[in-house]
Amino acid sequence: MRDVELYRHLLGLEAPWTVRSVELNVPGQRVDVWASHAEDVRWPCPECGTSLGLYDHSEERMWRHLDSCQFMTYLHAQPPRVECPSHGVRQVRLPWAEVRARFTALFERLAIDVLKETDIRGATRILRISWDEAWHILERAVERGQRAKRPRVTPHLGVDEKAIAKGHQYLTLVCDLDRSTVEYLAEDRKQASLEGYFAGLSEAQLAGLKTQVDAFEGDGSALAQNMVVTKLAPAFRTIMTNSEGALMDLFRSMTDASQHPAAPGPRLRSPSPLSSVPTGPTTTAEVPTGPNVEGPNR
């Protein structure tokens, strides 16, 4: 019983969950832990929170947990399901991992810390996971960070394109030059690539964009200029009606050029080159929360 109680504490399991059994495989350097729950438990619907009785269980799943010394540790459980009158049959949320995750929240938190200090290849060697698993953790962290971000005005935008592979494959990036954060990524370098960023902004955010949008020389400059004129010109006219100086002159020439497509438009240079802005997603990543992890559970 000592090993069962030990792993209940290591996993941070609380009622109605507990550890049913622990299996140690010394030759394989592995520990497998099985979790189960008490009977007659009512579970909240993951969609609306309605308290419901148990409907059935999903098939047994396995999650990688923090290593026990040099032994890789795996948690096994059959997730309960409920039948909600409004949402149908749904799997309940588990306290140790997020939906569709293959790792516990505590393992993902460690993995994110490692990924911040090294590259993907280094993280795979340290954590003993595959390349795809490392990217999966990284993508989930960025998604959490994006969901947690509150809408705000980004006064100084940087728009650029980055070649990501041979064969003219590109990404379009929108960056906050003041905070040095990547705000938006899209495949290719077409107008539709950049339209996705503006489509996600509210009217208040569009109106709040101030005095400076930085386009860059190169193949992306015409795209950025066109989007500035078509999407931001109304807000700029409101903000800059009484403005004078070089920036206003450039703005006027841009709006004039938009009325005459054959005329070459101006090329704007960013006072803060995008090369100094980190292109990785760590600025928006959030670590998952779970048992004994600081922050609210997700």
Image (spheres, rainbow, N blue to C red):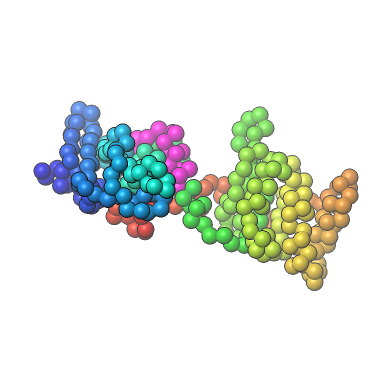
Main SS type for the magenta part? helix
What stretch of residues is rendered in magenta? 126-141
Identified at 80% across, 71% down, the residue is: 242
23 left or right of 183 in image: left
| Extreme-front residue of the structure | 85
**Residue 34, quarter of the rendered image:** top left
**Residue 115, quarter of the rendered image:** top left
Identified at 41% across, 36% down, the residue is: 133
**Residue 123, quarter of the rendered image:** top left
| Extreme-left residue of the structure | 1
The answer to whether residue 298 is magenta is no
| Extreme-bottom residue of the structure | 242
Identified at 61% across, 36% down, the residue is: 164
222 or 296: which is nearer to us? 296
285 or 114: which is nearer to us? 285
Residue 189 location, x and y as percent? 69, 40
The answer to whether residue 136 is magenta is yes
Residue 131 location, x and y as percent? 44, 33
Is residue 109 at all visible to an observer of this figure?
A: no
Is residue 214 at all visible to an observer of this figure?
A: yes
Identified at 65% across, 63% down, the residue is: 204
164 or 32: which is nearer to us? 32
* Number of on-image labels: 0
Quarter the N terminus occupies = top left
Residue 126 location, x and y as percent? 36, 38
Residue 58 location, x and y as percent? 32, 36
